[in-house]
Amino acid sequence: VNSDFELPDTVGQWETLRNTIAGRTVVTPAQQESLNLSKESLALRKEEAKKSEEERIKNREGGTSQKFLSGGFGARMLEAEKNMKELTSQGFNRADLKTSAQSALPNPLRTPEFQRQDQAERNFINATLRRESGAAISQSEFDNAQTQYLPRAGDTPEVLKQKQENRHQAIRSMLSEAGPEVRKQILKKDMGTFYDQILHETEDAFANPSSEVRMINGSKYQKVQGGWKLVE
């Protein structure tokens, strides 16, 4: 008999001895409480990590959705600008007093060119204002935007150029928000080329302000009584 061996004094010590002989791991109440707390902490950390990942995915998807929204509006604005530019190159002048008088006529009495111009203008304004407000557009908002962006009766070439630059700046800003990947998916080849022209436009339309003939965005205008006439 080992004289150094001491018999357990309490029931707990006897239980510990039996578990030790049987090869079982003994966990004290204090240890069990600590273990429970560790499990709860681990579960909490897992839940927080899950929520964080869900939030990250939500933000990423929301950001992508917003980019496609901006890209869609920008594409409509770009298409409208392209139509207006084509009309101008064909000799249509929205700022001409006689031409502008058609705005008071019912649509069937307007020329096809004026109808096309009017539709392009509405597309541009609707895309611009819906992106800014996200709601229905009031008549006053529409009228103000027309004055800011679109040619109107009696506008001088300087004002026409300024309004054109306002439109180009709005298009650049909108499609810049979309980002290169979304632009690549949304813009067709010809529209992408047109966007590049707007993006890198540096032409000075008024290098010679006193001249009777002026170049505006590659088109030649001649001074006539009551305004300017597209020459070529």
Image (cartoon, grey):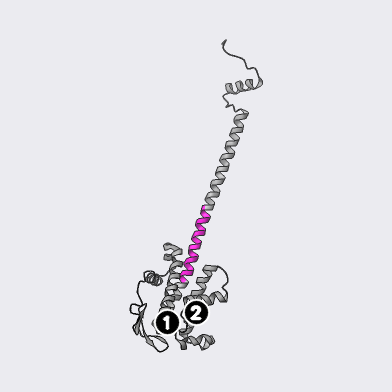
Image coordinates of residue 147 in percent, x first then y, are 49, 77
Image coordinates of residue 48 in percent, x first then y, are 56, 46
- Checking the image for residue 156, the label placed there is 1
N-term-proximal mark, 1 vs 2? 2
- Decide: is 134 above or below 223: above
Task: Return the residue at label 2.
Answer: 119
| Label 2: element kind | helix
The question of residue 67 being in magenta is answered with yes
- Decide: is 31 above or below 188: above
Q: Residue at x 51, y 85 (%)?
A: 103
- Quadrant in which the C terminus is drawn: bottom left
The image quadrant of residue 9 is top right
Q: Taken as a whole, is the magenta stretch helix, strand or loop? A: helix
* Residue 191 in sight: yes
* Residue 85 in sight: no
Q: Which range is magenta?
A: 56-75
Mark-to-mark CA distance, 1 and 2: 23 Å
Q: Residue at x 47, y 82 (%)?
A: 152
Q: For this rendering, which residue is in front, 208 or 190? A: 208
Q: Is residue 185 left or right of residue 58?
A: left
